[in-house]
């Protein structure tokens, strides 16, 4: 990876066990970058361990084909209410690029592109009824109502079960499934439909209205912002460090990578997604199954590390799990870009 795709490469400090940072951060996405900044403000020294050869996590910016134009291959859109991202961009000199107007919509169905809508004539009537139901439920949720006018719950049903309940035909499922990749946070059979409905409610209620509030992308990409946040925090960064095991106890925390490297610190923060988290073995056991069942809706918990019970209020990017480890295990979900 060259300096164009990874402008931080020449500034990375690779550390060893002897460096003994106070805090280890597992993951160099926006969650890890935000954690590094928050810890630096509070006077902690930190080292970030990243499994990939790049930072940014789900935000992945790289040149498109042979051009010099950066293209986002991961999360990109910034909405007006996502103040933490706006503040971070302002601090680190990352400009915002307004979204171009939508001039045409196309849908792929029946093996071809169409401009007349997402549903075939046979499914159109049912599709329109389902979209109207989604919009009504989304706006009810926006008002703080947990049930719609039919008495149906909006808060304790999964996304998949919700689509079944409204009788969604395949066209509706395809449309909502595409927007789920923007608004959802995991397995649609387990994550609540509120993740989807609340995103619809930010617009006019219908799924396609999500684009209306997707206002900006970042000039230089999300990767650039994460890089500048980590560099600005003064934290060291170790790339290609895929953590597979974490031992934790009264004497601190020791993560070990797949290639046998290890680090030791007073505490560790796991700022990684659900899938990488599931691959990490904890010793002693850290109730991983319970953690993976939790909904990512809790904002900014107080994380305590070790017997000194130092407290840091961290604001991190969903859907990253942020977990403080040292003797005991406390877990929290939070968001940098609030939905």
Image: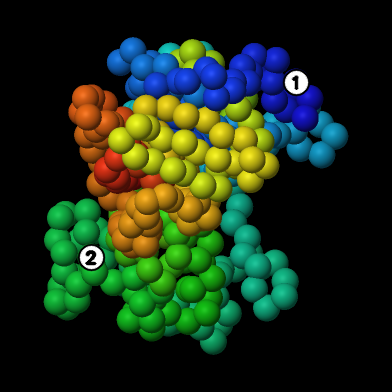
Residue plotted at (64% across, 73% down):
109
**Mark 1 secondary-structure assignment:** loop
Viewer-closest of 132 and 146: 146
**Residue 70 vs residue 314: left or right?**
right
Q: Quadrant of residue 242?
A: top right
Residue plotted at (43% across, 50% down):
282
**Mark 2 secondary-structure assignment:** loop
Q: Which mark is residue 155?
A: 2
**Residue 239, relative to residue 4: is it above or below?**
below
**x%, y% of residue 272?**
47, 43
**x%, y% of residue 223?**
59, 30
Viewer-closest of 207 and 189: 189
How packed is label 1: few (under 14 Cα within 10 Å), some, or many (20 or more)? few
**x%, y% of residue 108?**
65, 68
Residue plotted at (22% across, 59% down):
141
Q: Which mark is residue 3?
A: 1
Viewer-closest of 18 and 134: 18
């Amino acid at each position: 990876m060259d300096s164009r795709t990874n402008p931080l490469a020449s500034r990375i400090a690779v550390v060893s066990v002897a460096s003994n940072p106070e805090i280890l951060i597992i993951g160099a996405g926006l969650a890890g970058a935000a954690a590094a900044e928050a810890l630096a403000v509070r006077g902690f020294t930190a080292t970030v361990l990243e499994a990939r050869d790049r930072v940014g996590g789900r935000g992945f910016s790289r040149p498109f084909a042979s051009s010099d134009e950066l293209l986002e291959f991961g999360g990109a859109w910034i909405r007006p209410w996502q103040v933490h991202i706006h503040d971070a961009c302002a601090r680190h000199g990352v400009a915002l690029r307004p979204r171009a107007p939508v001039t045409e919509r196309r849908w792929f169905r029946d093996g071809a592109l169409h401009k007349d809508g997402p549903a075939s004539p046979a499914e159109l009537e049912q599709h329109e009824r389902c979209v109207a139901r989604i919009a009504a439920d989304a706006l009810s949720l926006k008002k703080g109502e947990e049930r719609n006018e039919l008495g149906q719950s909006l808060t304790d049903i999964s996304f998949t079960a919700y689509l079944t309940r409204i009788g969604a035909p395949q066209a509706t499922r395809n449309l909502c499934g595409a927007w789920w990749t923007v608004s959802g946070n995991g397995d649609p059979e387990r994550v609540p439909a509120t993740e989807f409905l609340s995103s619809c409610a930010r617009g006019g209620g219908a799924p396609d209205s999500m684009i209306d509030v997707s206002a900006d992308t970042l000039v230089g990409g999300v990767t650039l912002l994460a890089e500048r946040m980590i560099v600005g925090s003064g934290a060291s960064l170790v790339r290609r460090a895929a953590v597979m095991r974490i031992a934790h106890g009264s004497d601190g925390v020791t993560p070990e990578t797949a290639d046998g490297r290890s680090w030791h610190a007073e505490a560790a923060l796991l700022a990684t997604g659900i899938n990488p988290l599931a691959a990490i073995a904890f010793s002693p056991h850290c109730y991983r199954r319970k953690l993976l069942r939790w909904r990512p809706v809790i904002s900014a918990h107080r994380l305590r590390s070790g017997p000194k019970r130092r407290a840091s209020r961290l604001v991190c990017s969903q859907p990253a799990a942020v977990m403080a480890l040292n003797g005991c295990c406390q877990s929290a979900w939070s968001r940098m870009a609030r939905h």
